Amino acid sequence: MSEEKGYAVLIIAASFTLMIMPFYITFNELLTEVIKSIGLWWFIENYIAPIVARLTASMLALLGLEATLSGPVVYLNAPGGAVALYIAWNCIGWQSIVVFSAISYLVLKESPLPCYEKLTTFIVGIQGTVLVNILRIALVGLIAVWAGKGPAILFHDYFGSLVTLGWLVLFWFMSTRTGGDTVAGA
């Protein structure tokens, strides 16, 4: 791919991401209300969020920050004092896993790929989605340590969804591009 085509693809991907962002955020809000109404939030809060907190603390430790845990709260040692990073049930990225799973179903159900390749694509995508969510949460912690609470909240509230949506677009773009053994190229 030429450099000009590479830039064109990036511009198109960025435009597409920004175009669907309002729908993605609205859909996430709808999912949140459904999960709250059926009471599943309690399971996520008490069982999944502490696991995500441990993974986030491990990621931050890999990045050189001293992190300790108390349930779903990661405490980071910062020059100005400890920073508490509360990993709420609604901030762990479960919505992106639901969205990824729905897209996977739609894309892979009609694919001529063998079942094991469809399953491999799905598993790699889920793993990538979880990793991106851990990185996104770790970034919030890093920003809180380096720049303060305000910029961390700004990143969390506005740019965190862009990171996740960017991952979803990138994954499916790479998975469905023509040529080779890809979903669309089989």
Image (cartoon, grey):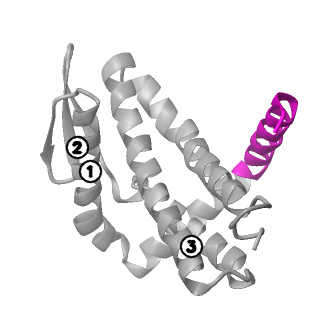
Give the labeled residue for mark 2: 58
Circle 3 SS class = helix
Three-letter amino acid code at the position of disc 1: Leu
Name the foreground residue: 47 vs 178: 178
Residue 101: mark in rendering:
3
Give the labeled residue for mark 1: 55
Q: Earlier in the sequence, mark 3 or mark 2?
A: 2
Residues at marks 2 and 1 touching, judged by CB atoms closer than 8 Å? yes
Name the foreground residue: 129 vs 2: 2
Q: How many marks?
A: 3
Residue 19 belongs to the span the image colors magenta: yes
The span picked out in magenta is: 1-21
Q: Position of residue 59 (x, y in %)?
A: 29, 41
Name the foreground residue: 63 vs 124: 124
Q: Earlier in the sequence, mark 1 or mark 3?
A: 1
Residue that appears at 67% across and 78% down: 108
Residue 70: mark in rendering:
none
Q: Is residue 38 left or right of residue 113?
A: left
Three-letter amino acid code at the position of disc 2: Ser
Three-letter amino acid code at the position of disc 3: Ser
